[in-house]
């Protein structure tokens, strides 16, 4: 099973100003998050962000924030319990008018529901806290969750790796930034191939 850009959304969890300096390999983790967001924009994949208690931990970097369609401020460690699901799975719009008042042969068929993007590609910090709880919450909400390991971090490698073990055990797919890039592209003939390749290099 490969990632499909047309069925994907990207979620970037808590790359915050006061948190990143203490994250193991934090600059590489943030660099990969930025690459993911830029690739997603090139391939028309929606990008969302979260910030944990931004009054205390500060906001996400401005260059990351501007690549997100929206950024959710949260107090729960798991963003799925703070209403993230409504962003990722918007409610279908009601059909206007009172269709039931017309004879059946004059009624318009109901509008097709907004096509859902069921695959959530997630990366963030800390891997063993907010990233883990958000990813597991999305699994409970029946999304297909893929975690980008080289764009995730914790203060220690031990905590980060323990999070990956637990996520894999829960059925989450573990991937890397380059795996996401080339699976979204699928072919060197993709119109965004050169731009994505430049981001990877």
Image: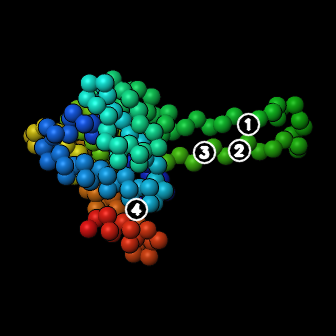
The residue that disc 3 covers is 114
Where residue 98 sits, quadrant-wise, is top right
Q: Secondary structure at mark 4?
A: helix
The residue that disc 1 covers is 95
| Image quadrant in which the C terminus is located | bottom left
Foreground of the two, 143 or 71: 71
| Image quadrant in which the N terminus is located | bottom left
**The label number, if any, that marks residue 165 in the structure image:** none
Q: Secondary structure at mark 1?
A: loop
Residue located at (38% from left, 40% from top)? 49
The residue that disc 4 covers is 184
Number of labels in the image equals 4
Residue located at (28% from left, 62% from top)? 178
Q: Give percent across and percent down for residue 70.
A: 45, 39
- Mark 4 / mark 2, whichever is N-terminal: 2
The residue that disc 2 covers is 111
Q: Can the viewer see residue 68?
A: yes
Q: Give percent across and percent down for residue 138.
A: 38, 37
User: In the picture shown, does residue 129 fall above or below 195?
Assistant: above
Q: Residue furthest bottom?
A: 189
Q: Tell me how far mark 4 sits from mark 2, CA to CA.
A: 29 Å
Q: Tell me how far mark 1 sits from mark 2, CA to CA.
A: 7 Å
- Mark 4 / mark 3, whichever is N-terminal: 3
- Mark 3 / mark 1, whichever is N-terminal: 1
User: In the picture shown, does residue 31 fall above or below 155?
Assistant: below
Where residue 168 sits, quadrant-wise, is top left
Foreground mark, 4 or 2, reads 4
- Mark 4 / mark 1, whichever is N-terminal: 1
Label 4: how many residues lie within 10 Å, few (<14), some (14-19) or many (20+)? many
Q: Are marks 1 and 2 in contact (CB under 8 Å)?
A: yes
């Amino acid at each position: 099973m490969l990632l499909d850009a047309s069925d994907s959304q990207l979620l970037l969890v808590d790359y915050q100003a006061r948190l990143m300096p203490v994250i193991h390999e934090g600059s590489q983790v943030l660099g990969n998050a930025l690459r993911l967001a830029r690739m997603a924009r090139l391939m028309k994949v929606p990008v969302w962000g979260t910030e944990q208690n931004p009054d205390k931990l500060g906001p996400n970097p401005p260059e990351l924030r501007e690549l997100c369609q929206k950024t959710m401020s949260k107090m729960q460690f798991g963003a799925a319990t703070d209403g993230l699901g409504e962003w990722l799975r918007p409610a279908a719009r009601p059909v206007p008018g009172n269709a039931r008042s017309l004879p059946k042969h004059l009624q318009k068929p109901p509008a097709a529901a907004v096509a859902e993007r069921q695959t959530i590609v997630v990366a963030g910090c800390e891997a063993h806290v907010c990233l883990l709880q958000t990813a597991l919450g999305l699994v409970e909400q029946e999304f297909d969750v893929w975690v980008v390991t080289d764009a995730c971090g914790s203060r220690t490698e031990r905590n980060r790796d323990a999070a990956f073990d637990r996520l894999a055990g829960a059925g989450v797919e573990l991937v890397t930034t380059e795996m996401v890039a080339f699976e979204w592209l699928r072919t060197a003939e993709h119109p965004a191939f050169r731009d994505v390749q430049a981001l990877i290099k």
